[in-house]
Image (tube, grey):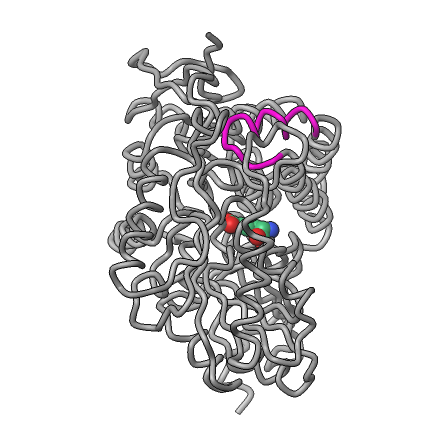
Amino acid sequence: MEKFNNYINGKWIPARSGKTFLNINPANTSDIIGEFALSEQEDVNDAVRAAKIAFEKWRRTPAPKRGDYIRKVGDIFTRRKDEIARAMTREMGKPVFETKGDIQEAIDTAYYSATETRRLFGYNAPSELYNKMNLSFRVPIGVVGVITAFNFPIAVPSWKILPAIASGNTVVFKPSKDVPHAGVMFAEVMEEAGLPPGVFNVLLGKGAMGNMLVEHPDVKVIGFTGSTEIGCKLGEICGRLNKRISLEMGGKNPQIVMDDANLELALEGVLWGAFGTTGQRCTATSRLILHKNIYDKFIEMLAEKASKLRLGEGLKEGTDVGPVIHEAQLKTCEDYVRIGLEEGARLVIGGKRAMDGELAKGYFFEPTIFADVTKDMRIFKEEIFGPILSVSKAESFEHAIELANAVEYGLSSSIYTKNVNQAFAAINEIEAGITYINAPTIGAEAHMPFGGVKGTGNGHREGGWTVFDIFTEWKTVYVDYSDKLQRAQIDNY
Ligand code: UN1
């Protein structure tokens, strides 16, 4: 069996304890991906020490020079796209066309971040005094800890790692325990790009090790994507330690379909939004809000199409929907089906494990649709992270918006309508970090701000120019060239 180690200070090394853990293919549980280093406190200390030392040189490397390395990262991901995509599919299940998209998002992020190293704009402003100049610059912060989920094993880490490094920070990355191989491949790419030792480090392991990284006094900033439960706990730790943390957490994203919408288009949208990545996206469409005039008809159209989605191994040509990530996630899906039925929702299709033929070898769950879901039900409010869609009926546009906003989360959202007034009103009224008009809730692009309001986050935005606000501090500079003492607020008044 293949063994995979941590990447610390430019070297591949096992965990100090020698401990390892296994990871399996969720589409075929007898296929073992490999044996991975199980990192603990000492390994965290080693990686953070390496990153701290590397920071002193890296922060003094001119930003455009740092960009040259990151551009190479984009080139290498481009060259290795197919091969890494296949390995990712084997490790986490989503079909190859999706894992290719995942890598493309990292390529886009690499080129975007590399270009930003020639900008990283600060501001200047007039001084109150004539012979004085006021400037401000972004400066790097130090060692950044990156902790991410399994569902986008390369793209989401890249959103944090590449801008953090472009800004002059160094990084210790802990991939999800469910996708350690992707973390290894990320490190291989960084190694080939020739980044100086210690600028980027990967620690493989489980959840507890993430806490150690967050608690480590030399880790100054954390970028986290994962569950609300864990994110909030890490947020508490960072509050106590006065550290910056960017939290990207859960979603319960609505797609509204109004009675004037192009229904075929809305149908394609919800199929992709709800069942793409097997519903395991923080941006997945988990609630469908239908105007009463099209409610029955649309549910019928949807049920027909959704029941034809082809479940299977993501490496197999023609697969639409892969497995969920592990047994516990299957169990969660089953629990929510039971809860939905107990709450009185109507099960339209699906609702159980898919066990036909080859599917019995993996963690497959049937695409599931509940109708007549009301806003007090748990399946309306709680993130499931699986292929389960809740459908609710709206009496009017206002009611649709009210339903869309009736949850604790606020990441993505969508409305299908041809009425331009309604579309713009929805942009104003939906409480979410992202709103799509006539497009599904998934499909964020690397160069735009990404993040949510309410329970989804803590005010930061990854992606785009906004991610640099997470990974930089401001340095304000006043240059007085008057050759005398000029007292602001005093000598000029
Ligand atoms: C996530 O689910 O964590 O917009 C990120 C999208 C993708 C990113 C999803 N580009 O769905």
How many circles with numbers are drawn on the protein?
A: 0
- Residue at 60% x, 36% y is 95
- Residue at 58% x, 32% y is 314
Which of the 4 quarters of the picture holds residue 204?
A: top left
Give the camera-side residue of 159 and 381.
381
Furthest toward the top, the residue is: 1
Query: Could you tell me residue 308's position as x and y percent?
Result: 59, 47
User: In the figure, is residue 405 to the left or right of 416?
Assistant: left
- Residue at 50% x, 24% y is 181
User: In the figure, is residue 22 to the left or right of 28?
Assistant: left
Furthest toward the bottom, the residue is: 493
- 61 relative to 187, above or below: below
- 90 relative to 452, above or below: above
Q: Is residue 174 visible?
A: no
Looking at the magenta stretch, what is its main secondary structure? Answer: helix
Q: Is residue 464 visible?
A: yes
Which of the 4 quarters of the picture holds residue 313?
A: top right
Q: Is residue 283 magenta?
A: no
Which of the 4 quarters of the picture holds residue 71?
A: top right
Q: Is residue 86 magenta?
A: yes
- Residue at 35% x, 19% y is 21
Magenta region: which residues? 82-95
User: In the figure, is residue 67 to the left or right of 460?
Assistant: right
Give the camera-side residue of 83 and 364.
364
Query: Could you tell me residue 457's position as x and y percent?
Result: 41, 60
Query: Could you tell me residue 320's position as x and y percent?
Result: 61, 41
Query: Could you tell me residue 280's position as x and y percent?
Result: 47, 46
- 479 relative to 359, above or below: below
